[in-house]
Image (cartoon, helix red, strand yellow):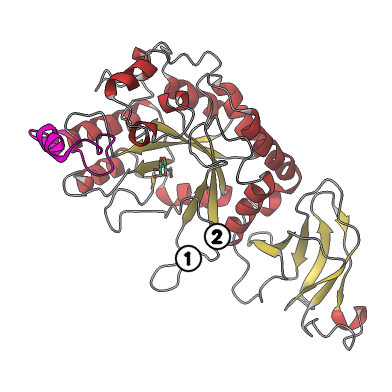
Amino acid sequence: MKFDENLARFQHDRFGMFIHWGVYAMHGTNEWCQYRSKISQEDYQFMIDHFEPDMFDPKHWAQTAKRVGMKYVIFTTKHHDGFCMWDTQFTDYKITNSPAKRDVLREIVDAFREEGIAVGLYYSISDWYHPDFIIDGSHSLHHLPQEEIDRLNEGRDMSRYAQYMRDQVRELLTEFGEIVEFWFDVSGKIDPVACESQAMYDMIRELQPHIILNNRLALPGCEDILTPENYLRDEDCVDADGNSVPWEGCHTLSASWCYNRDEKSYAKTPLRILETIITQTSLNGNSLINIGPTARGYISPLEMKSLDFVAHWMKYNARSIYGCGSAPKDFPPPPKDCRYTYNKKLNRLYVHILHWPRGALSLRGLTGRVKYAQLLSDGSAFQIEKVGNFTNENLNPRFHKDAAALRLMNQPEDTPIPVIEVFLKD
Ligand code: GLC
């Protein structure tokens, strides 16, 4: 595959699944548990020695992602804890040396591909386990007295660590087939010189030239996409010339990226998650929605609830997401509480109605431009008229003269965010 093709596919698909899964799921709080709860390496090892994900069923994960309409997956091969979720030959600190005894990554890659879902990999540059990675303020040992940190840092050699990273990334990019996206992460500030980011970048481009790289290699200009995290933007990402830059907003379902046992009512409602996906598409962004499976390996019922909610909506409305981006620049803004997405190829505008108003909706700038309109979820026609025909302007001065008016009845049942598909005239 060529890079441009891959990026076009990525922007067409718009929607992927992020998975944070590792030994940290056992702590049931946060993937930073080793750091936050000052867990010693000995105690962390004790957890690893009890890691038995007997209900790990990657096929079910993959089928779930497919049902939700997710087109690609990004899996945490190694988080900041340094523990590797594949049978790497470069360390013993890996899943196949735990009671799990399975090459989890291999199984995930195979299962998702089988469902037609493209595979991307997350890899943490920060590593709280590797003996050459310098202990800094965002290392799990940051809480030790400074003299102790200085002592432990003596003899640490970041260039050896950089080589280790390159060895591992080479392994990931040669043994697991085509990887569509490589998702670097860091726990704090990373020095691109010490981490030899340029050499890493060159190697990746050589091994898989089509790959999409995120912006966390700390190498300015090397990124293909920006990755705003847990932050819902209200505008597209643009470069200095105002041109749209590819981006992917990633979001947790709860407060943590990994499984959180105490999370009983998710801060983000399923509706909010759906709104996030729609809003990001309307701003030319992709959506990477995260799950954190339990330590036994299944997706928690709470997370499943959110996923099911999105799956149901996507089943009937995915056409307003795939192949869509922001509305043409010359379009006036959508009505209040609405989001536009637009499919250039089909020349169709999708009006997402977050709060269903009574009576009518006025679509500014669209008078005379509408060929046909229907409710996307069931294909039932909508009447679109010139405002002048439809309503007395003296009574409804808020209607713009150039607006097309949509007559609305009751909110369609069972459709949390209804979408009107508007076929535009060429
Ligand atoms: C942050 C968190 C990390 C998580 C990542 C995902 O960097 O520190 O735990 O994996 O976000 O975007």
Among the two numbered marks 2 and 1 on one chain, the one whose residue lies closer to the N terminus: 1
* Circle 1: residue type: Ser
Say whether residue 13 is left or right of residue 226.
right
Q: Is residue 119 magenta?
A: no
User: Which is the main secondary structure of the residues drawn in magenta?
Assistant: loop
Looking at the figure, which quarter contains the C terminus? bottom right
Looking at the figure, which quarter contains the N terminus? top left
Vertical comparison of 299 with 8: above or below: above
Residue 225 on image: x %, y %: 42, 54
Vertical comparison of 77 with 321: above or below: above
Residue 387 falls in image quadrant: bottom right
Vertical comparison of 206 with 24: above or below: below
Q: Residue at x 55, y 60 (%)?
A: 284
* Circle 2: residue type: Asn
Q: Quadrant of ligand 1?
A: top left
Q: Residue at x 45, y 69 (%)?
A: 243
Residue segment shown in magenta? 133-160
The residue indicated by pointer 2 is 284
Instruction: Tell me the distance, in whole angstroms, between the alpha carbons under discs 2 and 1.
Output: 8 Å
The residue indicated by pointer 1 is 244
Regarding mark 2 in the picture, which secondary structure is present there?
Answer: loop
Regarding mark 1 in the picture, which secondary structure is present there?
Answer: loop
Label 2: few (<14), some or many (≥20) within 10 Å? Answer: many
Q: Is mark 2 within 8 Å of ligand 1?
A: no
CB-based contact (under 8 Å), mark 2 and mark 1: yes
| Residue farthest left in this picture | 155
Vertical comparison of 391 with 266: above or below: below
Residue 239 on image: x %, y %: 40, 68
